[in-house]
């Protein structure tokens, strides 16, 4: 007589087990979403639905960037370092008081002892021009690598105050003008946080036929 005992029949999963499994799966997916959010936060804030593209297209600069809602170019200044300094060619695009995009010619005569004070935020072609950059980090963009840092800016007139301004210097892979090989983005008086500026810098793309 065969006395081998047959294995017990496998029970179908109960509703409770199915619900627990689904909850675990949903929890895992949520954890991945949260992890992705944290990773994105390391490189800049997530773009919101109000963010929009702006084309900066001139003789020396041609890029597309995504900026927070409400920001737009409201002034373009030639030779922003001062009209009297004809040896320092440059251009500045102002987005209100929040964001500045500017570029200076590589042969611009820059004072090695620049003071970031009382309306002067620095004339930069490369990081070597920055008097005292703090927490420099490299960020990839669609137009070339960028170095993002913080600088201390102060105003000392009737009232003394200072700010940690976020700044980025982008080395352009394919500059529209070879004499302007870099681009500077800055938030004067830290109107934007470093994370917000980093998000704008990361959004940089070259101007294409689709740009408007």
Image (spheres, rainbow, N blue to C red):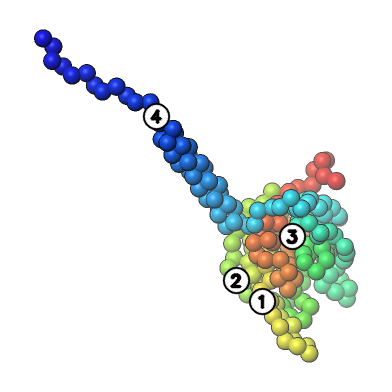
Q: Which of marks 4 and 2 is in front?
A: 4
Displayed quadrant of residue 208:
top right
**Which numbered dot is residue 13?**
4
For label 1, the residue is: 152
**Which numbered dot is residue 183?**
3
Q: Which of marks 1 and 3 is nearer the N terminus?
A: 1
Mark pair 4, 2: CA separation: 59 Å
Percent x, y of residue 139: 62, 56
Displayed quadrant of residue 123:
bottom right
Residues at discs 2 and 1 in contact (Cβ within 8 Å): yes
Q: Earlier in the sequence, mark 4 or mark 2?
A: 4
In the displayed orientation, state which residue is furthest to the top.
1
Mark pair 4, 3: CA separation: 62 Å
Mark pair 2, 1: CA separation: 9 Å
Q: What element carries label 4?
A: loop
For label 2, the residue is: 134
Residues at discs 1 and 3 in contact (Cβ within 8 Å): no
Displayed quadrant of residue 209:
top right
């Amino acid at each position: 007589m065969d006395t081998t005992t047959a294995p017990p029949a496998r029970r179908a999963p109960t509703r409770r087990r199915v619900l627990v499994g689904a909850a675990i799966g949903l929890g895992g997916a949520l954890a991945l979403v949260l992890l992705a959010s944290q990773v994105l936060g390391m490189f800049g804030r997530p773009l919101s639905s109000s963010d929009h593209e702006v084309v900066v297209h001139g003789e020396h600069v041609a890029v597309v960037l995504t900026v927070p809602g409400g920001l737009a170019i409201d002034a373009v200044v030639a030779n922003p370092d001062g009209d009297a300094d004809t040896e320092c060619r440059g251009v500045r695009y102002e987005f209100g008081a929040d964001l500045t995009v500017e570029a200076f010619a590589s042969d611009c005569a820059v004072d090695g002892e620049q003071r970031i004070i009382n309306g002067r935020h620095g004339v930069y072609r490369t990081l070597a021009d920055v008097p005292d950059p703090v927490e420099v980090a490299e960020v990839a963009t669609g137009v070339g690598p960028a170095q993002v840092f913080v600088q201390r800016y102060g105003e000392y007139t009737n009232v003394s105050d200072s700010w940690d301004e976020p700044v980025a210097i982008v080395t352009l892979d394919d500059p529209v003008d070879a004499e302007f090989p870099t681009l500077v983005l800055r938030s004067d008086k830290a109107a934007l946080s470093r994370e917000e500026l980093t998000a704008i810098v990361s959004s940089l793309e070259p101007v294409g036929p689709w740009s408007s």
